[in-house]
């Protein structure tokens, strides 16, 4: 490979998305902490007038952390590691470089319009698919551009076998594309009626059908945004950081196909005891339990990768992040199926146990993995040492405490409320009025708000650390091979 | 036969089909490694050895290139 | 066969797509053939109610309130008859919600009045001591977008054959002709309210968000 001696990987697009991941991560978590505090202390609803109520901010929180923070993180790590596992540089093709940058610009326009429209209350009001139709169209463009960059890089690759991370990225691309298009089918009303707002549409589906399609999306957006690309990250970053190849490559291939096959069916577990046909509910329940297998297949594979190298866990804080991430992945993929059992769901559904479950996944698994990924990439992208190891350690313990506080308080809150709703006295009358079941949750809501503050503080430390790395870290002569150097 | 019945048959047989495929794949994975046609575990090194100028772990046709090396 | 799947990214993508599309094809698509049929006697939302539904969506009430009563005694005791699929036939989008920080609202029209809602939206703790729901005072001044609500009625009538009368049709003239009916309906709601500014606005031919929202909430039965 003489001709490539001067060739280097080009991280310009990865850097751009890293910055947006940190930016949106901060904004999204700040809003999340605020709305958590609003539930404990309702006076906080009036900070921003009409735009500051819990209800208006809640979709903003979910959209900014999912489509701002997580998706930026996915793009950033993709533009970093796809080059490396395919052994091809972005610099080799002006076309792909252009596509990558164009994707970034359109993505920024989209993200900003999303924030503005949601604040104004312009929403399609389907959870995790709130954006109105013009924004949906722009989303499709951004997504297609990503696909062009992905398959462009794959077309130029030197490494003929696709590494397992690339399998997962391809699945992420295809899965989201299919589900997004299907769920966001809507008719703009102004085009049909000739009057009214351009920013309004009605769903193609009504009632129960709409619910089915929506949760098919809601559930599988979790699959293809919070699971699949994050597994792609850990399959690259953990081996690379530790210098240990994946424990069993064959197991990773099998878990992949297992996950692809099973995950989709489980969508209807969001609609247990609702008006969708009974057999779909049962299918959702059964497949949710089966889903433990492929999920744990990946997670155990990751933990076994550290076999014989567990000393790194005490020495390298990034390994801590990643090992804890796969542990939380195991926890939430066990908790989810438990909640999908019909009798458990009867108590758990509509309570705070559900946000509790979501957050041990997203805070403990998704965000930990993205932050670990960025801390691994930063020294290589900026050719500087990571600014402070102490900060990373402190951040780790702060955020771990936060996650534990979050899910324990929400477990208690959820089960308390679920039991109180159905409690009856000796004559068979309901024991509690609804408001009783709300006021009792105050201490748990306060604990959750505290956990939000801790996690956000940890995130600020992370952001500061990356900023200082890029500007003031000690310069590196050579790219570090495995372990990320930190001062 | 109404649509519900069709759905039932379709889901049953498609599931069986995909399960058979999955197990077929497992057998394929182990058999091709046993025969020495492929080495899947080697692919794990793609993440470890990922410099732009390092030799690809797997070129277009691993079988023939490996055999060539063996013949040398 | 598997060899090709591993080596050819295109075939691989097709394989992934088949595996992930399969569940949806079998489980979801056939359901649309049996489009949700409305229960007997279900009427489409009036334009004012649609405008109220838009307010419900705009302020994202589903963040805390469900509209789905599950078939358990504890729920039917608290909220009334459990929900039926046909009751949602005109809901685009569905508004079941996924979290009950506040109570279910699917049949709130059975046990709450215009007056109660007016007090509650102005200051929730005045009628529910200990409530953590924010006050929505801006709904008393903001105007509901009844024109867009009308556009929605026209759209669902044209595209999805929702049974509206012949006076709902595309175009500005049709809308101008229809508008007084919406104001008339709003006046009936405002008559039961005590906020003078809201009454005055309705008499001027404007519809504050609160009026539309109450029309929608009263309709939920």
Image (cartoon, coloured by chain):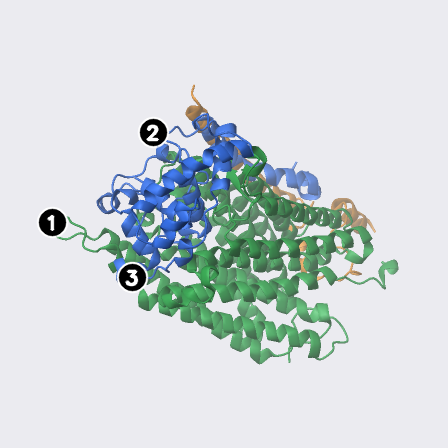
Chain colours: A green, B orange, C blue
Is A356 displayed left or right of A299 in the figure?
left
Residue A442 vs residue A384, the one in the foreground: A442
Residue for point 65% across, 41% down: C13
Give the Cα separation between the discs numbered 3 and 2.
36 Å
* Callout 2 touching callout 1 (CB < 8 Å): no
Position above or below: A138 against A352: above
Residue tagged 1 = A427
Query: Can residue B50 be seen here?
Result: no
Q: Quadrant of the N terminus of chain A?
A: bottom right
Looking at the rendered structure, the secondary structure element under dot 1 is loop
Q: How many marks?
A: 3
The percent coordinates of residue A440 (x first, y second) are: 27, 64
Residue tagged 3 = C125
Residue tagged 2 = C39
Single out the residue that lies furthest toward the right.
Answer: A3
Single out the residue that lies furthest toward the top.
Answer: B1
Position above or below: A286 against A433: above
Is A417 displayed left or right of A378 in the figure?
left
Q: Chain of mark 1?
A: A
The percent coordinates of residue A286 (x first, y second) are: 40, 42
Q: Answer few, some or many: residues within 10 Å of disc 1's Cα (few below 14, many 20 plus, some between 14 and 19).
A: few
């Amino acid at each position: 490979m003489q001709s490539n001696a001067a060739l280097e990987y080009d991280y310009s697009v990865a850097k751009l998305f890293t910055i947006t991941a940190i930016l949106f991560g901060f904004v999204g978590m700040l809003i999340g902490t605020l709305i958590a505090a609003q539930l404990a202390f309702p006076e906080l609803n009036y900070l921003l007038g009409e735009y500051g109520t819990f209800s208006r901010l809640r979709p903003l929180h979910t959209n900014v952390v999912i489509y701002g923070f997580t998706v930026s993180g996915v793009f950033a790590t993709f533009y970093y590691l796809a080059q490396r596992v395919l052994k091809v540089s972005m610099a080799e093709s002006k076309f792909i470089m252009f596509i990558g940058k164009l994707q970034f610009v359109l993505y920024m326009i989209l993200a900003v319009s999303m924030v503005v429209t949601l604040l104004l209350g312009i929403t399609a009001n389907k959870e995790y698919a709130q954006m109105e139709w013009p924004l949906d169209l722009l989303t499709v463009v951004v997504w297609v551009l990503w696909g062009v960059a992905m398959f462009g890089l794959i077309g130029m690759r030197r490494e003929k076998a696709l590494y397992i991370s690339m399998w997962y990225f391809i699945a992420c691309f295809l899965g989201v594309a299919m589900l997004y298009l299907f769920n966001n089918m809507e008719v703009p009303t102004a085009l049909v009626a000739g009057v009214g707002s351009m920013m309004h549409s009605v769903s193609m589906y009504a009632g129960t059908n709409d619910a089915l399609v929506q949760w098919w999306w809601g559930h599988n957006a979790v699959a293809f945004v919070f699971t699949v690309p994050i597994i792609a990250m850990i399959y690259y970053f953990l081996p690379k950081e530790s210098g240990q190849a994946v424990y069993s490559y064959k197991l990773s291939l099998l878990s992949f196909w297992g996950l692809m096959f099973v995950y989709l069916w489980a969508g209807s577990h969001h609609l247990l005891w609702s008006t969708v046909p009974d057999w779909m509910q049962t299918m959702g329940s059964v497949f949710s339990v089966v889903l433990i297998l492929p999920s744990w297949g990946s997670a155990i594979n990751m933990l076994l990768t550290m076999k014989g190298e567990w000393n790194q866990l005490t020495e390298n804080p990034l390994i801590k992040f990643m090992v804890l991430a796969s542990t939380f992945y195991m926890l939430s993929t066990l908790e989810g199926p438990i909640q999908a059992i019909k009798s458990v769901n009867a108590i758990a559904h509509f309570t705070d146990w559900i946000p509790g479950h979501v957050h041990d996944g997203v805070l403990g698994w998704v965000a930990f993995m993205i932050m670990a990924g960025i801390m691994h990439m930063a020294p290589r992208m900026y050719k500087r040492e990571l600014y402070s190891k102490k900060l990373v350690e402190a951040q780790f313990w702060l955020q771990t405490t936060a996650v534990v506080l979050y899910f324990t308080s929400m477990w208690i809150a959820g089960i308390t409320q679920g039991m109180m709703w159905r409690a009856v006295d000796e004559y068979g009358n309901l024991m509690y009025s609804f408001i009783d079941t709300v006021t009792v949750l105050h201490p748990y809501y306060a604990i959750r708000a505290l956990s939000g503050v801790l996690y956000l503080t940890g995130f600020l430390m992370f952001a500061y650390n990356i900023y200082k790395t890029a500007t003031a870290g000690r310069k590196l002569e050579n790219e570090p091979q495995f372990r990320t150097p930190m001062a | 036969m109404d649509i519900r019945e069709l759905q039932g048959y379709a889901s049953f047989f498609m599931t069986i089909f995909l399960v058979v495929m999955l197990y077929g794949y497992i057998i394929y994975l182990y058999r091709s490694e046993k025969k020495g046609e492929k080495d899947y575990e080697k692919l794990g090194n793609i993440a470890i050895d990922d410099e732009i100028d390092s030799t690809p772990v797997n070129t277009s046709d691993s079988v023939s290139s490996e055999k060539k090396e063996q013949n040398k | 066969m598997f060899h090709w799947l591993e080596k050819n990214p295109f075939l691989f993508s097709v394989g992934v797509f088949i595996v992930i599309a399969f569940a949806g094809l079998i489980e979801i698509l056939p359901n649309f053939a049996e489009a949700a049929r409305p229960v007997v006697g279900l009427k489409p939302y009036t334009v004012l109610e649609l405008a109220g539904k838009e307010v419900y969506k705009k302020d994202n009430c589903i963040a805390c309130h469900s509209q789905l009563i599950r078939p358990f005694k504890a729920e039917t005791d608290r909220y009334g008859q459990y929900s039926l699929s046909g009751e949602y036939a005109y809901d685009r989008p569905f508004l079941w919600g996924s979290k009950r920080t506040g109570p279910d609202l699917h049949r709130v029209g059975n046990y709450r009045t215009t007056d109660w809602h007016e007090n509650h939206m102005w200051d929730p703790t005045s009628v529910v001591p200990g409530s953590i729901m924010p006050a929505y005072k801006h709904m008393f001044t903001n105007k509901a977008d009844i024109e867009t609500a009308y556009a929605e009625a026209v759209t669902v009538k044209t595209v999805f054959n929702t049974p509206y009368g012949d006076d709902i049709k595309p175009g500005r003239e049709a809308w101008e002709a229809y508008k007084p009916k919406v104001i008339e309906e709003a006046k009936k709601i405002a008559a039961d309210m005590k906020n003078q500014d809201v009454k005055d606005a309705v008499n001027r031919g404007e519809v504050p968000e609160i009026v539309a929202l109450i029309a929608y909430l009263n309709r939920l039965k």
